[in-house]
Image (spheres, rainbow, N blue to C red):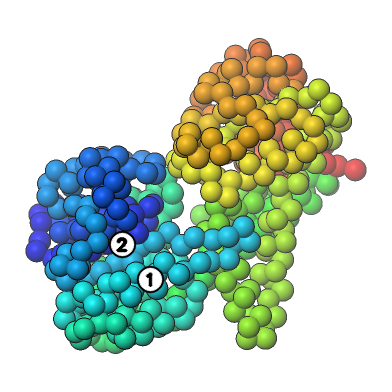
Amino acid sequence: MESNSTKVCVFGLWHLGLVTSGCLAELGFDVIAIADNQTECDALNNGFLPIYEPELEHLISKNIASGRLQFATQDCDLISSAEFVILAYDTPIDQDDHVNISNLFDTAKLIAPCLQENASVIINSQVPVGTSEKLSETIKSFAQSSINGVAYSPENLRLGQAIQRFMHPDFIVVGTENATVTKHVKQLYSEIDATVVWTNLRTAEMTKHALNAYLATGISFINEFANISDRVGADTLKVIEALKLDSRISANAPLTPGLGFSGGTLARDVQVLREIAKDKKQISSLLDSVIEVNSRQTTVVIEKITNTLQSFEGATIAILGLTYKPDTSTLRRSVALEIIEMLLAKGAKIRTYDPMVDRDELSKYTGFTFIDDVYSAVAGCDAAILATPWPEFHKLDFKKLKTPMRQAIILDAHNMLDSVKIKRAGFRYIGIGTGDQATQD
């Protein structure tokens, strides 16, 4: 990719910010990514990343070597050299999925006096509707020159597919506060081959809320349907196969029964909409139900394994997969950890395995044993629960997996495995919504 002279400054060097920095550099922009301190800066410039994302380490190293990407500590001269300043923080959430956007306002105050005349600030972080306008007011009140203004373009990355999603998105939404910002920001997004929906700030923010709330609703719907199907002996997977043949339902609709949505991303937007509805005295019954259904889905797994084992006295259970989704190393809001906590409370002993979990993050959790080999992890276990759908689990030798187990039981919480193959290997297979007897009256 040819370099161009357009300089971009990126704040927020975690998943979103690192992917944004690497991809913009790959597209030819001159990218300066701002680290919190010199230690972080040195580590990043030497190719040591704090997170795992497929191909990201290579992308970052390649563009550092090309000179299109550099990591630096905060410096007013660096900020003032950039035409575009991007706020790409991964928005933190609390245990109830409520957002904390204070770092965005702190950064807005920090960068405002340094912005060059006619610069544009682009917000990528997930924020509640109305936030971009407030950030614009903050920046303009601290700025020492006349800037173009603020744009909001919500990230639409998926961990494990983040680079592909950035470089080849289904679409891009950009909200701007005036025509000058729109014209300027078009220069940046013209390098990405995708349909761009141009709108105002609040509509762009609400688009992100709508997208994630829709996905969350689909997940809660199919999970509740699957639980009913289990009770009557129907196979939800066949129902879904039929549904997706209907032209009114997308073949990519989020209709995969299993564990609820986790990681905080979807729940964050549902909670924001609920809070807005409450503030505006609007009823949000559907959104309330989406959260309620999701919050109890983990107990379905516990009920199934309880009904199967009858007693947890002396029982040992293997949890296969700990990260909140495959192709990431993070344990943030992992459902697997919720399952472990519930099983420990019932008296079970827990052995675990995950191919990519961040060991430093893992060290913060106690009460279970982590084994770095899946076949050793199931040794002496009465059941194995597949909690994260890592692709490598498709390739397991299930006869070898069965040999060291005390009881040959697999609970596939994502219905990802070939149940026929598993049963032929001598396992009792339990899925979610597959019509098995584990939760029938």
Judge left or right: residue 413 versus residue 227. Answer: left
Element type at mark 2: strand
Mark positioned earlier in the residue sequence (1 or 2): 2
Place residue 138 in its image quadrant: bottom left
Place residue 327 in its image quadrant: top left
Please state the horizontal and vertical placement of residue 226, each as a whole percent of the image: 72, 50
Element type at mark 1: helix
The answer to whether one can see residue 419 in this image is: no
Q: Camera-side residue: 38 or 292?
A: 38
Foreground: disc 1 or disc 2: 1
Please state the horizontal and vertical placement of residue 145, each as a whole percent of the image: 19, 84
Place residue 287 in its image quadrant: bottom right
Q: Residues within 10 Å of mark 1 (few under 14, many from 20)?
A: few
Q: Camera-side residue: 124 or 114?
A: 114
The answer to whether one can see residue 411 in this image is: yes
Judge left or right: residue 175 versus residue 242. Answer: left
Judge left or right: residue 406 versus residue 161. Answer: right
Q: Is residue 373 above or below residue 46?
A: above
Residue picked out by circle 1 = 106
The residue shown at (72%, 58%) is 293
Residue picked out by circle 2 = 11
Q: Residues within 10 Å of mark 2 (few under 14, many from 20)?
A: many
Please state the horizontal and vertical placement of residue 156, each as a whole percent of the image: 41, 61
What kind of residue is marked 1? Answer: Asp
